[in-house]
Image (cartoon, helix red, strand yellow):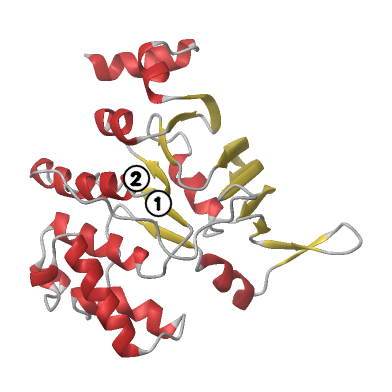
Amino acid sequence: MAETSTALGPSPGGPSAAAPAVSARGVCKQFAGIEVLRDVSLDVAAGETVCVVGPSGGGKSTFLRCLNWLDEPSSGTVLLDGAPIGRVPLPDGRTRPMTMRELAAARTRVGMVFQHFALWPHLTALGNVVEAPIQVLGRPRAEALAEGRRLLERVGLADRADAYPHALSGGQKQRVAISRALAMRPSLLLFDEPTSALDPEMVGEVLSVIRGLAQGGQTMIVVTHEMAFARDVADRIVLLDAGRIVETGAPDAFFTHPRTERARRFLARYAR
């Protein structure tokens, strides 16, 4: 598939230039006593595309889920646009858990695209895109429908607006999922291996959409095994292994002159 020629611009209401779009500090996560994330800290600037790479089981997906509190970190803090998510600071220095209403409001600033699409099967492509803006944000239905059609057109699916998920290919479903995330006008987009469930011939159409978003300045963290894509689209590469950030750097430096032995061994697997 030919690459998208028109950049998909950032959502309105983007992050403040005064703070990183997302700032994670000392994030740890344990499941049943097993440490999955170990003191992970990362800042992502507004408009930056960060690709997180690493071996399976290294904690990449868990880290994404901790950023929007789908998984609550065992310790550490996450700030979105400078504001905390998950826990609210109190005047005496302690914190309290966010209420479900507060957490839902904070999550509206983050869009997440999952490996397996997570579309609602009883809704059309357009219905999937507009459901949350109408129900969660309270946008007028006519306004949401008009914007939903524009978003589907931007990802090449204007003619599939009335199709149900069962009638869509994997690549089309993922593009609907991206449109659904964009419909919330998020400051930050998280992609959890968005091509891993796709047939090889469908990978390109999804990566083309993500590349257009990056060119348009949308702030994104992309967990991916597509090394060539990561090198091409990322402003920064992060290698996450065994729950720790092993190395981070600009794509050219990371791929041509990795600083750590672990990064060299990881990259050697993809050179074969």
Q: In this view, does 22 lie above or below 164?
A: above
Three-letter code for the amino acid on which mark 2 is drawn:
Ala
Looking at the rendered structure, the secondary structure element under dot 1 is: loop
Three-letter code for the amino acid on which mark 1 is drawn:
Gln
> Is 230 on the left or on the right of 93, as rendered?
left
- The residue identified by callout 1 is 218
**Quarter of the figure with the C terminus:** top left
Percent across and percent down for residue 135 are: 42, 85
Percent across and percent down for residue 206 are: 20, 49
> Is 97 on the left or on the right of 227, as rendered?
right
Q: Is residue 173 above or below residue 211?
A: below
C-alpha gap between disc 2 and disc 1 = 6 Å
Percent across and percent down for residue 75 are: 69, 47
Residue that appears at 68% across and 69% down: 98
**Quarter of the figure with the N terminus:** top left
Q: Residue 214 carries which label?
A: 2
Residue that appears at 59% across and 50% down: 17
**Quarter residue 42 falls in:** top right
Decide: marks 2, 1 in contact (CB < 8 A)?
yes
**Quarter residue 61 falls in:** top left
